[in-house]
Amino acid sequence: MATAGKSVGGRSDTAAPAAIELRGISKAFGPVQANRNIDLRVPKGTIHGIIGENGAGKSTLMSILYGFYKPDAGEILVDGRPITIADSQTAIRAGIGMVFQHFKLVRNFTVLENVILGAEDGAMLRPSLSKARGVLKQLAAEYQLNVDPDATIDSLSVGHQQRVEILKALYRQADILILDEPTGVLTPAEADHLFRILEGLRDEGKTIILITHKLREIMEITDSVSVMRRGEMVASVRTAETSPEELAELMVGRKVLLNVDKQPARPQAPVLEMRNLSMVDDEGVERLRGVNLDIRAGEILGLAGVSGNGQTQLLEILGGYPPKNAKVGGEVRMNGQPLPLSGSRCNAGQRRRDGIGHIPEDRQVEGLIMDFAAWENVAFGWQDAPEFNKGWLMDNAAIRSDAAEKMERFDVRPRDPNLAARNFSGGNQQKIVVAREIERNPDLLLIGQPTRGVDIGAIEFIHKRIVELRDAGKAILLVSVELDEILSLSDRVAVMFDGRIMGERLPDQTTTGELGLLMAGVTDMSAPATAGIPPEDQHPEERA
Amino acid sequence: MNIKDSFIAIIVLAICLVWALADGTAAQQGIGSALRLMTPLLLACLAGLYSERAGVFDIGLEGKMLMAAFTSASVAFLTGSAWLGLAAGIAGALVLSLVHGLASITFKGNQLISGVAINFLASGLTVLVGQNAFGLGGRTPSLTGAGRFNPITLPFADTLRDVPVLGPIYSGLISGHTILVYVAFALVPLTWWVLFRTRFGLRLRAVGENPASVDTSGVSVTRLRYAAVAICGVLTGIAGAYLATALSAGFVKEMTAGRGFIALAALIFAKWRPWQALFATFLFGLLEAIANLYPDLDLGFVTVPSMFMNALPYILTVVILAGFVGRAVPPRAGGEPYVKER
């Protein structure tokens, strides 16, 4: 391959036999070439990272390995033998296990039931269940993979659910374990524990392929790393011989600034004041417990936290659509005026008129209508605006040209307003949402996970626009699970845990370590807070 | 099973007990009738349970039963054999099940629309073919003798008849039904066992909750769902055959009379569980039997008109479907065709 700068050992390296070898794998979806002539060699007993932007083809490649897709061309060798992986069953039999980013667990089944599903011995369940119980006990002891075998998945923390996925693979006697973005949903402590498990597995001779977009993880745990860009494998290097800067450059093909270039903030009067904001959902669970936060004009307030600790509910309430049957208490003032938190005046349209823009967390569900054209999506929320209407009728020509302008300014590609939202890449979908919200010049912009599933080029662009809006004297609430993003973008950082604000820090006076502890509910560095901490954090092995 | 789960059973058994204490003979007659009337509901309810537990919603139970009633009555009349009629009923319902499977599994279509289409198809086709073949305005000729399933007397029913308490219950209630009634009741523990004790049941439940987990475990989602839809076809086939060749003596236009939908309501009432399905359908059977037994129920101060009594099962259906019986959480992947995600 012309673009492959370096390679691990090369094929002449016979000392470590390859657990997996790919030769010339290609796969196209219609006109899109997802994988082009991929070569990859992963030696036995190593942790190999695969890094690349979204849409670089990492997941497609791994799906081919797990039998989800058939490659158009190329060869797969497992332990030196060429095999055809027609379906997941073949992959499992070849010793390949996969831990998906979104867990494939049956939520109301027990751990045991999930583990044996598809790998039962015989038509009756009982023997399989008792066998699995024994195997799980053994695996738990061997790899620190403790999970209660009789707990239902619903009752487990995300970290434990992930362990179940790993156990599933090990129960099927996987020798090669593929993990797709495994740390996205974990707290720093859980991620550390996962890495220790992976190291243990490697030491037992298992081969691990780790797909991630987090450079820090690659540097921390992998033995070697391959970089993908636009469907091609651009480099394979030993981790010890590379640097995060080099990898980032390989990923995007040019130098990127991982730090956002911005002037110090000049915050003014508070735009939004939350006083004792609380929320109880329809199942009686307290999602917000007395949140007090001010967001001032001309500053970006970053709200850090592991997802599921109330950030979503906070955004939904501020955005004007609190969850159904939720009881909201406390007070929120916008520019000094109380904001309705329930009733008919609490709706997203009114919020927009009150000067609140919102880039929601899940652009595909809340931000866009995927089957509608880009120009329609750009108008959403403002379809009643006078410039978009002619008497009773909508002025589609005006909306279209307005959309085309915004797409131009935000560099949305392809620049075709008639294309349905779902046909844009994740980054470009997000740019459509960002364009719609920022161009309306809101006094307060709510942003949830602005760069989730967005490539580095678009991240840079979106970050720049957010900073510009701040410099124009607007208030910005940034909710993100990416600590790096929070730290590089925010002027002030608040950490949320279990519906509470655990503390506020200035980004240049804190560390990811300190924030990580706050995100895990630890207020005092020396002693763990006990109240309201999910069971995950009470397990002794977490603190070892 | 805790108290909350068995509240339907408690209600139903309480009604039976009160009735038996108030008027033993009438209760024996009424409950016996209820058992016969609930049988098609129970079969259809279990049919829906298999299908919906596997993630394929089926509002075409009604149409399948109707088709099965027609094919079974026709074949039973032509051959003079109720058993051949039963086979034809199962075949008729299976064909419609296959249509539903093709639409909702293979072609990933909308399951509700497919179900509605099946109901219309069955409703029109049975009358059209029936009129063409027999010329009786959509009816089939009356079945007699071996063309029907006849009541069977269980062993010792006669000897035990005079034993107090046990006699009336065993000889009067339990004995004396057609074989299909016993089949339906035996299917309840069998279904429970299949669902919760076998590999097939585990996979079936999993595919209705999260097909992706089944798929990534290397098991075919398509095959499992077709199996479930086929079981649903067999059971609705038996239900239809029962209606036409055991409960009545031939096919009459629209003879299912909404039983498929009542069975769906019972399924929701039972929260997709077999034992609860038994009692939920029993409740509907009981209501229907009471309406038959007391056309004008005189409560002393007011006389309930027969129209109201006949409407009771349907009223209960509406109440259940409107969600007045607590939250019923359907299988999570229900109604969704499975598409592999990237």
Image (cartoon, helix red, strand yellow):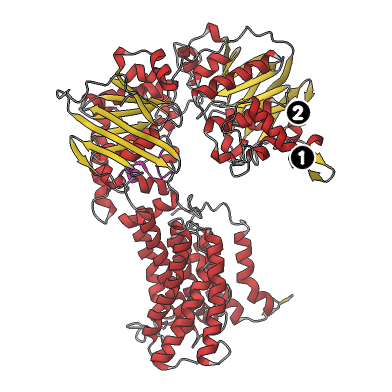
Q: Find disc 1 in the rendering and name its residue.
A: A344
Q: Quadrant of the C terminus of chain A?
A: top left
Label of residue B200 in the image:
none
Q: Which is nearer the eye, B233 or A150?
A: B233
Q: Residues within 10 Å of mark 1 (few under 14, many from 20)?
A: few
Q: Looking at numbered disc 2 in the image, what kind of residue is underneath it?
A: Leu
Q: Residue furthest left?
A: A15
Residue A420 locus on image (x, y percent)? 59, 42
The reply to the same-chain question for discs 1 and 2 is: yes
Mark 1–mark 2 Cα distance, whole angstroms, equals 12 Å
Q: Looking at numbered disc 1 in the image, what kind of residue is underneath it?
A: Ser
* Vertical relation: A372 (above or below) A223: below
Residue A285 visible in this rendered orientation of the protein = no
Residue A109 forms part of the magenta stretch: yes
Residue A1 forms part of the magenta stretch: no
Q: Which is nearer the eye, A124 or B38?
A: A124
What residue is rendered at 29% in x and 27% in y?
Answer: A144
Q: Quadrant of residue A138?
A: top left
What's drawn in magenta, residue-wise?
A103-117
The answer to whether residue A5 is left or right of residue A29 is left
Residue A362 locus on image (x, y percent)? 57, 34
Quick one: SS at disc 1?
Answer: loop
What residue is rendered at 40% in x and 78% in y?
Answer: B180
Q: Find disc 2 in the rendering and name its residue.
A: A339
